[in-house]
Image (spheres, rainbow, N blue to C red):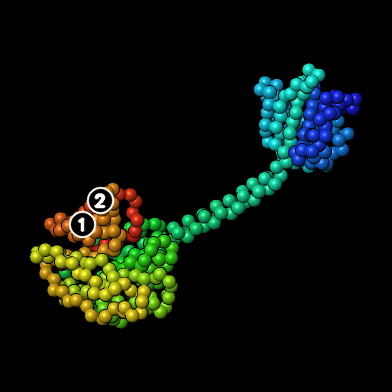
């Protein structure tokens, strides 16, 4: 309702100049909620003439549907002596300005109670909140797309994991686990003919999307090169030159161990570049097959030689190839498992059937490790029957 006969109390007239200097809107109502004062910033915010608000009560300012909200805050005023809530200020043209109402009951010098309300315009904050909501919605959509892409990439990456098989006198068991959804490891266990089986384990530096893409490309190049080369040493040299000249990415390097089995699996040609030592287990114990070359794809002057080590294998012999994610793990005391730890574990599994060796090795390393997997893990175990 509107009461145009409301007069500004004398004590308030003495404060008007101070209230007009404030940046925020100020309104004062009497104990019947009739507006007795509105400063210029508040009138300007609502696009009112101050005379438009003088003597008005909330039901003459707010729509009937929104009035219960205002009255609940008034009840809080009466009960607790103050209130603060986010709502809106109706403009003269019907638009709604988002504001914060901060109210307090005060007692005037005349002994009457008055309601002092400070009105803070939060239009800018609301615009920013809306922009943030829109940005977050966009980011959520992008995140869902990234997750879908990663899920697809993970399936593709899993297809690069080496597969176990039985070939002539050899049985092959494999294991692969990326540190993230996708990684930079891959393995190849592929017969080239009835007389040749190639076994390769490769580790592209890093893990995640970039190394996974590089691993995919190098995987394809390895398969292509295997069709025409007969030497693991030649393969390493070609992959080194390919990575250095064709990919030419700063920090791109890889390690690789390559074995070529012939004579039904009884003879092995082996070459390795910068890779953790392979392990040859026989009735004479465990022998480490160290890398003959440095890491691949890094510096042109350290191109690997084309030579390979020739090894005669007997029935019961095993060859263990792996990536450094299996040995560069730490326990709670910050001790690294290392090649020595893996070698001891491999020896402990020497009497186990091949079908149990893979899980025994992976389980033993996991039991040692403290915390989550930090690097991709690939493992290939070959046994001569």
> Which type of secondary structure does the marked residue at label 1 adopt?
helix
Instruction: Classify residue 65 as left or right of residue 384.
Output: right
- The mark total stands at 2
Residue 125 image offset from top left, x and y in percent = 67, 45
The image shows residue 332, relative to residue 78, as above or below, that is below
Does the image show residue 258? no
**Residue drawn 70% across the image and 42% down it:** 122
Q: Which residue is mark 2?
A: 368
**Residue drawn 81% across the image and 36% down it:** 20
Q: Farthest left residue?
A: 284
Which label was assigned to residue 251?
Answer: none
> Which type of secondary structure does the marked residue at label 2 adopt?
helix
Residue 110 image offset from top left, x and y in percent = 81, 19
Which is nearer the eye, 251 or 238?
251
Q: Label 2 crowding class (10 Å Cα cut-off): few <14, some 14-19, many 20+?
A: some
Does the image show residue 23? yes
The image shows residue 184, relative to residue 330, as above or below, that is below
Instruction: Classify residue 84 as left or right of residue 385.
Output: right
In which quadrant of the rendered image does the N terminus lie? top right
Q: Farthest right residue?
A: 5
Q: Which residue is mark 1?
A: 341
The image shows residue 60, relative to residue 238, as above or below, that is above
Which is nearer the eye, 359 or 168?
359
**Residue drawn 39% across the image and 57% down it:** 180
Q: Label 1 crowding class (10 Å Cα cut-off): few <14, some 14-19, many 20+?
A: some
In which quadrant of the rendered image does the C terminus lie? bottom left
């Amino acid at each position: 309702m509107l009461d145009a006969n409301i007069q500004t109390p004398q004590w308030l007239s003495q404060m008007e100049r101070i209230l007009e200097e404030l940046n925020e809107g100020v309104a004062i109502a009497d104990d019947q909620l009739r507006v007795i004062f509105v400063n210029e910033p508040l009138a300007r915010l609502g696009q009112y003439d101050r005379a438009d608000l003088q003597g008005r009560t909330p039901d003459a300012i707010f729509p009937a549907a929104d009035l219960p909200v205002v009255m609940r805050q008034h009840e809080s005023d009466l009960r607790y002596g103050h209130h603060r809530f986010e709502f809106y200020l109706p403009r003269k043209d019907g638009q709604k300005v988002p504001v914060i109402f901060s109210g307090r009951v005060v007692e005037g010098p005349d002994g009457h109670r008055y309601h002092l309300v400070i009105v803070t315009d939060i239009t800018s904050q609301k615009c920013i909140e809306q922009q943030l909501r829109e940005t977050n919605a966009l980011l959520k959509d992008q995140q869902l797309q990234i997750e879908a892409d990663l899920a697809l990439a993970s399936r593709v990456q899993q297809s690069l994991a080496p597969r176990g098989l039985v070939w002539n006198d050899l049985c092959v068991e494999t294991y692969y686990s990326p540190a993230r959804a996708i990684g930079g490891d891959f393995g190849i266990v592929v017969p080239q003919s009835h007389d040749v089986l190639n076994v390769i384990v490769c580790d592209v530096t890093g893990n995640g999307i970039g190394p996974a893409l590089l691993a995919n490309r190098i995987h394809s190049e390895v398969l292509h090169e295997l069709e025409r080369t007969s030497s693991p040493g030649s393969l390493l040299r070609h992959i080194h030159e390919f990575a250095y000249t064709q990919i030419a990415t700063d920090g791109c390097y890889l390690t690789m161990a390559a074995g070529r089995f012939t004579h039904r699996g009884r003879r092995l040609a082996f070459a390795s570049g910068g890779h953790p030592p392979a392990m040859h287990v026989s009735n004479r114990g465990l022998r480490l097959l160290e890398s003959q070359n440095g890491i691949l794809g890094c510096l042109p002057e350290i191109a690997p030689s084309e030579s390979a080590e020739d090894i005669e294998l007997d029935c019961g012999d095993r060859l263990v190839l792996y990536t450094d994610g299996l040995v560069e793990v730490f326990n709670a005391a910050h001790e690294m498992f290392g090649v020595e730890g893996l070698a001891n574990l491999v020896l402990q599994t020497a009497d186990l059937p091949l079908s149990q060796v893979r899980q025994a090795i992976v389980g033993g390393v996991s039991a040692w490790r403290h915390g989550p997997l930090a690097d991709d893990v690939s493992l290939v175990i070959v046994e001569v029957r």
